[in-house]
Amino acid sequence: MATEDAAIADRILTLGEKGYRVDRDGALLDPGDWDEAFASELASRHGIPDGLTERHWEVILFIRRYWAETGSCPTVFQTCRILGLHPAGFHYLFPTGYQSGA
């Protein structure tokens, strides 16, 4: 198990001049490392090839604020209800799903 943990901790995703420590699924090991460049790169890797729109950013920033305030991630239902977004619209924005796409 220690070898697996070390391998996960050693993954670095480099974007421009910045390196991000990520797990084997590409999720940040330290949420404090998140920035818009990281989000934009993930978007292109998760079925959003044309970049993030204002609506994408509204959802992403809502999820980040919710997590910062509560320590947990809102459900898709909560996110859609609070932002006035239909679940089908959510799926259109984030076609690979909630966890990896947003």
Image (spheres, grey):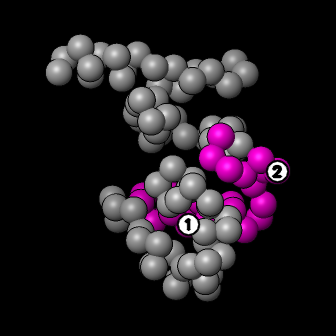
Residue 5 lies left or right of residue 90; in this view the side is left
Residue 4 lies left or right of residue 56; in this view the side is left
- What residue is shown at x 72% (from left), y 51% (from top)? 48
Tally of numbered tags: 2
| Residue 47 visible in this rendered orientation of the protein | yes
Q: Which residue is mark 1?
A: 62
Q: Could you tell me residue 62's position as x and y percent?
A: 56, 66
Q: Residue farthest to the left?
A: 1
The quarter of the picture where residue 34 lies is top right
| Residue 69 visible in this rendered orientation of the protein | no
Mark 1–mark 2 distance (CA, rounded to whole Å): 21 Å
Q: Nearer the viewer, mark 1 or mark 2?
A: 2
Q: Is residue 24 magenta?
A: no
Label 1: state its secondary structure.
helix
Point out the stretch of residues depicted in magenta. Answer: 45-68
Q: Amino acid at mark 2?
A: Asp
Label number found at residue 7: none
Q: Is residue 101 above or below residue 74?
A: above
Q: Earlier in the sequence, mark 1 or mark 2?
A: 2
Q: Could you tell me residue 22's position as x and y percent?
A: 46, 29
Q: Is residue 75 above or below residue 73?
A: below
Q: Amino acid at mark 1?
A: Phe
- What residue is shown at x 51% (from left), y 20% (from top)? 12
Label 2: state its secondary structure.
loop
Q: Which residue is mark 2?
A: 50
Crowd band around label 1 with a 10 angstrom C-alpha radius: few (<14), some (14–19), many (20+)? some
